Image: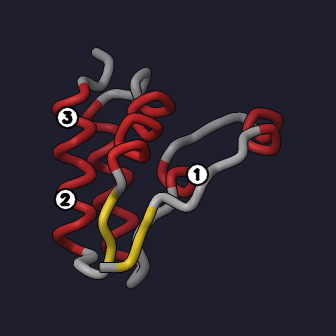
């Protein structure tokens, strides 16, 4: 089952709660959903949870979404955070 917008939003809220120094801009919510829509919620939740346990810094999209190396090199990811 593909990720819904509500599920994507809940994952981003989780990231913001764990890393209170950041906030996602509205356009970044849409951007993340565009690239994560084909992934399953459980997969994304597991990857984010694992990342949170290992890093004091918030994850970037390319750190939690798996792409082929060729596609990853072609994508340009904007900075998804603004400081509060």
For the point 27% across and 38% down, the residue is 8
Q: Position of residue 9 (x, y in %)?
A: 22, 42
Q: Position of residue 29 (x, y in %)?
A: 35, 43
Mark 2, secondary structure of its residue: helix
Q: CA distance from mark 2 to mark 3?
A: 11 Å
Q: Residue 15 vs residue 51: left or right?
A: left
- Circles 1 and 2 in contact, beta carbons < 8 Å: no
- Residue neighbourhood size for the residue with mark 1, other residues' Cα within 10 Å, grouped as few (<14), some (14–19), many (≥20): few
- Residue neighbourhood size for the residue with mark 2, other residues' Cα within 10 Å, grouped as few (<14), some (14–19), many (≥20): some
In the picture, residue 54 is in which quadrant? bottom left
Q: Position of residue 80 (x, y in %)?
A: 47, 58
Which of the two labelled residues, at mark 1 and mark 3, occupies the earlier sequence position?
Answer: 3
For the point 35% across and 63% down, the residue is 50
Does 77 sit above or below residue 9? below
Mark 3, secondary structure of its residue: helix
Q: Which residue is mark 2?
A: 14
Q: Nearer the viewer, residue 84 or 39?
A: 84
Q: CA distance from mark 1 to mark 3?
A: 18 Å
- Circles 1 and 3 in contact, beta carbons < 8 Å: no
Mark 1, secondary structure of its residue: helix
Q: Residue 65 vs residue 55: left or right?
A: right
For the point 36% across and 54% down, the residue is 25
Q: Which residue is mark 3?
A: 7
For the point 43% across and 40% down, the residue is 32
Q: CA distance from mark 1 to mark 2?
A: 17 Å
Q: Nearer the viewer, residue 54 or 75?
A: 75
Circle on res. 62 = 1
Quarter of the rendering occupied by the C terminus: bottom left
Which of the two labelled residues, at mark 2 and mark 3, occupies the earlier sequence position?
Answer: 3
Q: Position of residue 77 (x, y in %)?
A: 63, 50
Q: Residue 61 vs residue 53: left or right?
A: right
């Amino acid at each position: 089952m593909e990720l819904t917008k509500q599920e994507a939003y809940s994952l981003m809220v989780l990231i913001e709660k764990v890393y209170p120094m950041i906030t996602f801009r509205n356009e970044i919510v849409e951007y993340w959903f565009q690239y994560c829509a084909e992934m399953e919620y459980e997969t994304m939740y597991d990857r984010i949870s694992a990342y949170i346990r290992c890093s004091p810094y918030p994850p970037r999209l390319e750190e939690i979404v798996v792409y082929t190396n060729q596609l990853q090199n072609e994508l340009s990811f904007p900075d998804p955070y603004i400081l509060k």
